[in-house]
Amino acid sequence: MSNQLTVTGKFLAALATEAVGQNNFLVRKFYVDLTENPDYPNTPEFQLTGDKVALVENLQRGQTVQVKFSIDGRKVRNKTTGKESVITNLKVWKIDVLTTQSAAVATPVAPRPAPAPAPAISGPGQYAQQQASTGEQSDDLPF
């Protein structure tokens, strides 16, 4: 069974790199917006470790990224209560930038031609007069 997953979303932010444990193991967390419905935000926390912490160095907020990761879960026991729980991490091993956030470039739009002028009608009897001059009968019915 493969434990390699891929998601695509907008890069939001990365936290500072931390050195944890006795060996000062490097860990860095970052967030990607995967929201499909604004009523239900979806912004998971991903984790970079070791030499991978630099993968987010040059990312800008709003860039579309593809994140390749694996799920790492382990049981831990609370030393004071004895209660067991599971810690789950989304361990990233590759990030691809799909688009970069850039300023929109204004493209000149050709002006539209002016609409043809409407025929001048000076009063309510003008239409009836036009019909009379063309030989059509006017019956004052709207249909």
Image (cartoon, rainbow, N blue to C red):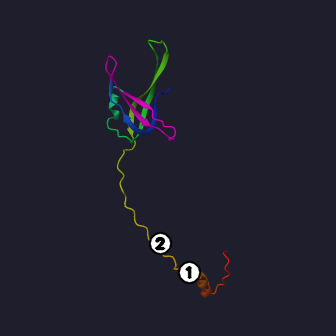
Instruction: Give the image quarter of residue 60.
Output: top left
For the residues labelled 2 and 1, the Cα–Cα distance comes to: 23 Å
Badge 1 amino acid? Gly
Q: Position of residue 26 (x, y in %)?
A: 33, 24
Q: Given this view, does label 2 or label 1 mark the residue nearer the observer?
A: 1
SS for dot 1: loop
The residue segment tinted magenta is 19-48
Location of residue 47 with respect to 83 vertically, above or below: below
Question: Which mark, by number, is residue 123?
Answer: 1
Instruction: Give the image quarter of residue 123.
Output: bottom right
Q: Residues within 10 Å of mark 1 (few under 14, many from 20)?
A: few
Question: Which mark, by number, is residue 115?
Answer: 2
Q: Position of residue 45 (x, y in %)?
A: 43, 31
Badge 2 amino acid? Pro
Q: Does the magenta run of residues contain 124?
A: no
Q: Residue at x 68, y 77 (%)?
A: 141
Q: Does the magenta run of residues contain 46?
A: yes
Taking the image as shown, residue 8 lies to the left or right of residue 16, namely right
SS for dot 2: loop
